[in-house]
Image (spheres, helix red, strand yellow):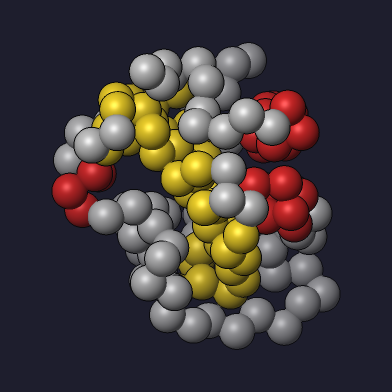
Amino acid sequence: MMTAERPPIDSSDAMELIAEFTRRGADTYYFPTREGPHTEIAGVLRRGPHWCDVYVLRGEDRVAAYRAYLINRGDNPLVPDAITWHYLGSAGPVLRALLALPAPGLDTAEAYVPPHPDLGVPLGQRLRYTVRPPRS
C-alpha cells in the first residue's frame, strides 16, 4: 500500500528530483486512485501570479510535466487552460527537464497552447486529495 511519504516509484534518482522540486517551494498533492490512497502524486511550484511548473506522477514510466499559464489568479494549475512547455515520459528525464526550465518569461518566446490530454489530473481524482506544503 502506498503512503503519503512514498510516491509510486522505486528510483532513488527520481525521489531525489522530487525532493529538489519540493525544496524549491512546491506543494505536493496526493490523489487516491483505484490502486490505493496515494497512487497519483502532483507537484505544483508557483512561479509568480500566472505561472506554475507542475509534474503529475502516475508511475515510474508515466510522468507528465508542464508549465501552466494561469489566465486568472484562481485558476487550477492541475487543469491548465494553456501551457508553454510539456514533457511526457519516465520519471528521471521528465523531472530533470522540469527542474532545468528557466524562469518563465525571461528571454524566451512563449507560445501558449492547449494542454495535451494526458496532462493534469482528472476531475474525479481532484475531488479528494491531501496536500503537503513544502517544509520551511
For the residue pair 120 and 24, the one nearer the viewer reads as 120
User: Which residue is at 41% across, 66% downward?
Assistant: 118
Picture coordinates of residue 21 (x, y %)? 67, 36
User: Which residue is at 80% across, 54% downward?
Assistant: 100
User: Which residue is at 78% across, 60% downward?
Assistant: 102
**Location of the N terminus (image quadrant):** top left
User: Which residue is at 43% across, 63% downward?
Assistant: 119
Q: Quadrant of residue 127?
A: top left
Picture coordinates of residue 43 (x, y %)? 52, 40
Q: Is residue 50 left or right of residue 111?
A: left
Q: Is residue 72 left or right of residue 44?
A: left
Picture coordinates of residue 129 (x, y %)? 28, 31
Q: Quadrant of residue 24?
A: top right
Q: Is residue 134 left or right of residue 70?
A: right
Picture coordinates of residue 30 (x, y %)? 38, 31
Number of disc labels: 0
Residue 61 visible to an observer of this rendering: yes
Q: Is residue 13 above or below residue 101?
A: above
Q: Quadrant of residue 39?
A: top left
Residue 48 visible to an observer of this rendering: no
For the residue pair 41 and 111, the one nearer the viewer reads as 41
**Location of the C terminus (image quadrant):** top right
